[in-house]
Amino acid sequence: MNPKLKKIVAITVIILGVFSWIYFVVNVYELKNNQHLAWQNYISIYHPKPVLVADISSWMTFDYINKIFKLPETLLKDTLQINDKRYPLLTIRQYTRETNTNTGLLVQNIQKAVETYLASSKTKQ
C-alpha cells in the first residue's frame, strides 16, 4: 500500500475515532439530562404542587373548590348565600354572569371563606 494512502487512512481512522468518542460523551451527557427531566416530569405528575387559596379562579366549579380544599359541601353555598339549584356543579363565572355580580369580588369572598374555614379547622386539630 502506498505510504501516503496509509497515512490518510490512519488519520481518517483517528478522526473518526475522536468524533465517535465525542458523540458517545455527548449522548451520555444528554441521557443524564433527560433522566433529570424525566424525574422532574414524574414529580410534577405524581406529586403536583398543592393548590393555594390564592389560585382560586373563576373557571373553577364550587364542587372543585370543595374537593381540593376538603370543604363541607354546603359551606360556600351557605356562606355566600347561593340559591342556584345547579350548585355545586357550576363555575364561579357562570354564577356571576347569571346573577349580575362582580366576578373578582366573588372570588375574593370565596378565598376569604376558604381561608377562614381552613384556619378554624387547624385550630380544632
Image (cartoon, rainbow, N blue to C red):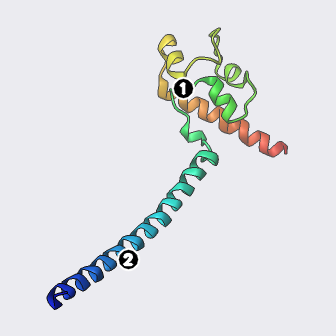
Q: Secondary structure at mark 1?
A: helix
Residue at point 38% right, 76% down? 21
Residue at the extreme front = 1
Which quadrant of the figure has residue 121? top right
Q: Amino acid at mark 1?
A: Leu
Which quadrant of the figure has residue 110? top right
Residue at the extreme right = 125
Sequence order check: which comes first, mark 2 or mark 1? 2
Q: Amino acid at mark 2?
A: Trp
Frontmost residue, 27 versus 68:
27
In percent of width and height, residue 7 lies at 20, 88
Residue at point 60% right, 43% down? 52
Quadrant in which the C terminus is drawn: top right
Q: Secondary structure at mark 2?
A: helix
Residue corresponding to mark 1? 106
In percent of width and height, residue 35 lies at 53, 60
The correct choice, above or below, for 91 with respect to 118 in the image is: above
Foreground: disc 2 or disc 1 = 2
Residue 20 as seen in the image, left or right of residue 63? left
Residue at point 31% right, 75% down? 19
Structural crowding at the residue carrying mark 2, measured as other residues with C-alpha within 10 Å and reported as few (<14), some (14–19) or many (≥20):
few
Q: Which mark is residue 18?
A: none
In percent of width and height, residue 23 lies at 36, 70
The correct choice, above or below, for 43 with respect to 35 in the image is: above
Distance in Å between CA atoms under marks 2 and 1: 62 Å
Frontmost residue, 27 versus 42:
27
Frontmost residue, 61 versus 17:
17
Residue at point 80% right, 45% down? 123
Residue corresponding to mark 2? 21
The correct choice, above or below, for 24 with respect to 101 in the image is: below
